[in-house]
Amino acid sequence: MRAKMTGMNDELVQIWSTGDAMIAELTRARLEDAGIDVLLKSSMGGSNAYPVGPSYLFVKAEQEQDARKVIADIESGVYAIDEDDVEEADQAPPVSDA
C-alpha cells in the first residue's frame, strides 16, 4: 500500500533522487515503513520493462529530517543483510499461509 499525501496544502520537499527505479521503490518502501509519507515521481522514458530516467522522492516538509535520517541509515548500511541474518532465516521454521 502506498502512502497518500492527505492535504493539498502540505509543502513537499525533494529529499532524494536516483537513476535506478528499483532502488527508488525500495527506498520509498523503507521510508513508509518508518511512518513517513512519500511521493515517488519518475520521469521515465523507455518501456515498463526497461525504464530510463531519474526518480525523485518527496516528503512533507515536517517529515524531512526523519526522512533524511532514514536515507542516511540506508546509505551507511544500517539495514544491510549480513551472514547472520541469512543463517537465521535459513534455520527459521517455514511460514504457512493458513
Image: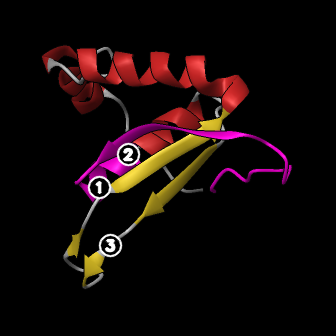
State the image coordinates of residue 14 (x, y, percent, origin top left): 51, 40
Q: Which residue is mark 2?
A: 26
**Mark 3 is on which residue type?**
Met
Q: Secondary structure at mark 1?
A: helix
What residue is drawn where x is 30% and y is 58%?
54
Query: Does the CB distance between marks 1 and 2 fall below 8 Å?
Result: yes
What residue is drawn where x is 18% and y is 22%?
87
**Mark 1 is on which residue type?**
Met
Binning the other alpha carbons within 10 Å of mark 1 as few (below 14), some (14 to 19) or many (20 upward) gives few
In the rendering, which numbered label is found on residue 22? 1
State the image coordinates of residue 5 (x, y, percent, origin top left): 75, 50
What residue is drawn where x is 85% and y is 47%?
9
Q: Secondary structure at mark 2?
A: helix
Total numbered labels placed on residues in the image: 3
**Mark 2 is on which residue type?**
Leu
In the image, is 73 to the left or to the right of 45?
A: right
Residue 31 to residue 42: above or below: above
Binning the other alpha carbons within 10 Å of mark 2 as few (below 14), some (14 to 19) or many (20 upward) gives few
Look at the image and give the residue range highlighted in magenta: 1-26
In the image, is 30 to the left or to the right of 85?
A: right
Query: Does the CB distance between marks 1 and 3 fall below 8 Å?
Result: no
Instruction: Indicate the quadrant where residue 84 lies.
Output: top left
Q: Who is closer to the viewer here, 82 or 78?
A: 78
Residue 15 included in the magenta stretch of the image: yes
Q: Which residue is mark 3?
A: 44
State the image coordinates of residue 7 (x, y, percent, origin top left): 86, 49
Q: Which quadrant holds the N terminus?
A: bottom right
